[in-house]
Image (cartoon, rainbow, N blue to C red):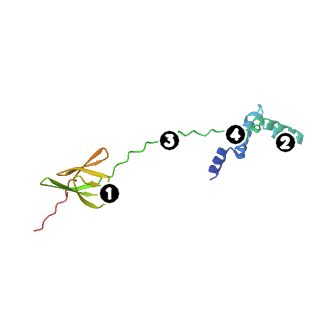
């Protein structure tokens, strides 16, 4: 939870962000630049026995090194957010036409009828030249029907019967 809060506040460019930077910079300056080259301890610690004016002077010298940080705009973002590519707009898929289902055809002596199931689920018997929904019945042949809707012609055929994979055994 703490990590999430810090990450959120770092993105927002808040005061906490600058405090964190100042602490990190202090550690860098403290370990790299302020310690003497002879291997002695930190100058502030060495002068702990000295007067308070010497300690203030040493501490003030290190604060001046942060002048560049304090002059920065606090609303400035340190880390630029990653630019997400714009999602590609997908073309809508063409609408599929809901065709009625053909159950059977009856062809006899030049007359033909078709047993169809509408999109609403009702069974109807239609002859050639009539319509079912928005489709016109163009032709009826043995096992197939041609439907027209606008400029397009659709062919329906009677579904093949399902074969039974299990055989029934007679007991005898």
Mark 3 against mark 1, which lies toward the viewer?
1
Mark nearer the N terminus (2 vs 1):
2
Residue picked out by circle 1: 119
Inspect this view and state whether residue 162 appears. Answer: no
Report which quarter residue 133 is drawn in.
bottom left
Residue picked out by circle 4: 76
* Mark 2, other Cα within 10 Å: few <14 / some 14–19 / many ≥20: few
Residue picked out by circle 3: 87
Inspect this view and state whether residue 130 appears. Answer: yes
Q: Residue at x 18, y 52 (%)?
A: 143
Mark 3 residue element: loop
Mark 1 against mark 4, which lies toward the viewer?
1
Q: Is residue 100 above or below residue 41?
A: below
Residue picked out by circle 2: 48
Q: Which residue is at the far bottom?
A: 172
Residue 12, numbered label:
none
Q: Which residue is at the far top?
A: 37
The answer to whether marks 3 and 1 mark residues whose Cβ atoms lie closer than 8 Å is no
* Mark 4, other Cα within 10 Å: few <14 / some 14–19 / many ≥20: few
Mark 4 residue element: loop
Between the C-alphas of marks 1 and 4, the distance is 61 Å
The answer to whether marks 1 and 4 mark residues whose Cβ atoms lie closer than 8 Å is no
Of residues 84 and 138, the one nearer the viewer is 138
Q: Position of residue 49 (x, y in %)?
A: 87, 42
């Amino acid at each position: 939870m703490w990590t999430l809060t810090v990450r959120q506040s770092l993105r927002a460019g808040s005061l906490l962000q600058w405090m964190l930077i100042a602490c990190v910079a202090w550690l860098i300056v403290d370990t790299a630049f302020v310690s003497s080259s002879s291997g002695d301890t930190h100058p502030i610690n060495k002068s702990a026995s000295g007067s308070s004016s010497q300690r203030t002077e040493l501490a003030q010298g290190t604060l001046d090194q942060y002048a560049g940080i304090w002059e920065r705009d606090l609303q400035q973002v340190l880390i630029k957010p990653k630019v997400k590519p714009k999602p590609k707009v997908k073309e809508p898929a063409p609408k599929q036409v809901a065709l009625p289902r053909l159950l059977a055809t009856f062809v006899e002596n030049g007359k033909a009828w078709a047993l169809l199931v509408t999109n609403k689920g009702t069974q109807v018997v239609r002859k050639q030249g009539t319509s079912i929904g928005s489709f016109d019945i163009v032709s009826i042949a043995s096992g197939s029907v041609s439907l027209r809707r606008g400029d397009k012609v659709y062919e329906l055929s009677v579904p093949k019967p399902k074969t039974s994979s299990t055989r029934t055994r007679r007991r005898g």
